[in-house]
Image (spheres, grey):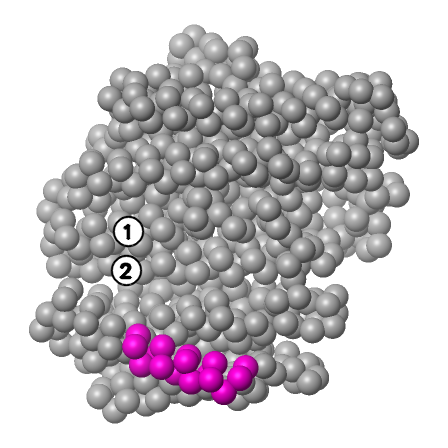
Amino acid sequence: MEYLVVFLVLVVFLQTRITDLKRAVICLGSQSFIIAIACFVLGLSNSQGIHAILPGVLTLIVKVLFIPGAVYRLVGKLKNEREILSASNVNYSTMAAALFLVLGYVIVERLLPGSAGRDIIAASILMIMTGLSLMVLRKRAIIQIVGLITLENGIYLLGLLMTEGLPLVVELGVFLDVLIAVVVLVILTSRMRLSFMTTDTSVMKKLKG
Amino acid sequence: MNYCITDLLYFILALPVIFSGVAATNCLGKDLLHWLNRLVATAVAGAIVMLTLSFDPDMPYIGRYIYLDALSMWMMIIIGTLYFAFAWTSKAYLDRDTNKRYGYLRRFGRLEGRFYALSHIFVWIMFVVVLVNNLGLMWVAIEATTLVSALLVAFKFTRTSLEATWKYVMVCTVGICLALLGTIIVYYIQLNNIGTANPLDWLYLAQHSGEINPAMAKFAFCFLFVGYGTKIGLAPMHAWLPDAHSEAPALTSGLLSGSLCICAIYVLIRNIIILMPAIGIDFISGLCLFFGIFTIAVAVPFVVVQRDIKRMLAYSSMENFGLMVAGLGLFVPVAAQAMLLHMFNHALVKYSLFYTAGTIMEEYGTKNMMRIHGMMVQVPKTACFLLLSIVAILGMPPFGVFFSKFYMIYGFFTADHPWMGIITLVLLAGMLIGILYHILRMLGSQPKRKSSGELFGVVDSVVIAALLLFSCVASAGLSEITVLNHLLESAARIVLGGVA
């Protein structure tokens, strides 16, 4: 479990520095893969039967294969697209992620002192905050989708750890929602490419007031 | 013939899905599609009427995944009425939008099938929101409404509608993710304080709400409030609301404003009922009152400077949602009843307003209110409906909204928040002045622009008139309609935490 946390933190830090869209998607896939392993580890140690392996299997299918696959296909159609950021900007993002990690540990110490999965809760808080900041600060639609999935992964991991998995029906519903969300976002992004000739969301500023 | 509640519920939950599956295949002829759509919605509305008549508010129906009590029954009535109105106005709207010079949909052929499929599934998910018994499933359904309605908001795929949809999906999904976090914390509380039986079951949690740990409950409530508040459109998180409401097709705007946002309020109420004994009324009441009134205060200036008619209506919706949340925060029976009644009235009147606004957009080829003059002369029927609905939404007697707003304001004074009541009254007056200024200018003065003639048909006029009349009769004569009155009283009791 500890190794997983190290890898997870590494991947999230990497995500704050990536500007190339393809690499961002691959990074997202590997992040989800780590979550899937965490699901298997926690599931097999805590419960029996279908509830032990189902979250892991679903994560593997939906978040590791389907979502990055769909987004990757979309990225393949985009030409000359990358997140434009200056070096100092990237450094600030990474620094912010480091702050979020410290913040995560502070929150854990305050709210749930002495809990078993202290490191992994901190890591999931890091993921939630990083996902939010990716969605707010980055301009490319693809990176915003990546941020959204990172946020969702963080919340999912936190839920997995705090409650040893949601009830089965709810779990299935959550996965279904994530799946539909990505489908909708991919449709929107490809329409955006047709209408605006770019996936830079900062060109969309006509609606105000 | 005698049907039991289970049959009726299965009927209500099965029919829209089947229809949208058929409509999505796009193999039906245009006329058949329109008539089938009307038939399905009428059948579902009829089933809801029968359900209302056979349902005893003091005896909630408990199924495996379904829980139906007075509060959910009330929401079913609201959504069902709008569903009925949607089905009977959709043909006129779609025909116009695919034919006339300003019709957005004219560039694409045969999109009616897809539009119907999405709309019916959208309404169906809202039925699911109010019927499921599980807090987690409620969350799932609310998120699903966002996603399905996103495709409806972007239906025209114009640049502005894409922008609105992107904002809508991004803002609402983040908000709803926070609500998921809140739900997870509620489950954590349940595991630690109550036990592992009946995970996240609403009734079970409500019966055991006394055993909840206050500190964690407060934490969970903050996330739930921010999360579902985003979906309701409360002030700092409202960025998506005017965009989505103004860019969607008029029918979708009506459904969004009339039923979707109150579904979010419904889920918030369900969560509040569980967490209230642990947190205490003061904290919840303070948050609801502050954000509710803040939302009204934010909406007023935007209405006054608005030029886009649908955006103006969207801000008016925000004002009404703010008022509902503030009314929820008062925690007195009269305000709780008024809030539920206001949901009903607002839904009906706002649907007719959005529909009328859509008609005006097609008659004049613009959404800009500054370019529309002399409607009384050019399009008397539309002008009449616009005036009536505006008068209704602003809360003037004899329309229904008057009664609900009046009792809500009365609630402020009985609940010992007189200053809040006065502030709300002042803000509502500002709203009235802002909206009337724009609307009267559109209705009066000399026509300066050619319109494409009166577009209100027979069927849609009847439906809109019926909506206005229904809201008027149901609120004014509430004490005479025993079924609705009894239902409303029981629903208000549930809102205040009186679970069977």
The residue positioned 42% from the left and 68% from the top of the image is A132
Q: Position of residue B45 (x, y in %)?
A: 56, 31
Q: Please report, as a chain letter, where disc 2 is located.
A: B
Residue type beneath disc 2: Ile
Judge whether B369 appears above or below B418 on screen.
below
Q: Which residue has dot 2 on it?
A: B184
Label 1 sits on what residue type?
Answer: Cys
Q: Earlier in the sequence, mark 2 or mark 1?
A: 2
The quadrant of the picture occupied by the C terminus of chain B is top left
> Residue at horizontal 36%, vertical 81%?
A95
Quadrant assignment, res B464: top right
Magenta segment range? Answer: A85-100
- The residue carrying pointer 1 sits among few (fewer than 14), some (14 to 19) or many (20 or more) residues within 10 Å by Cα, namely some
- Total marks in image: 2
Residue at the image point whose x is 25% and y is 72% from the top: A103
Q: Which residue is mark 1?
A: B222
**Label 2 vs label 1, nearer the camera:** 1
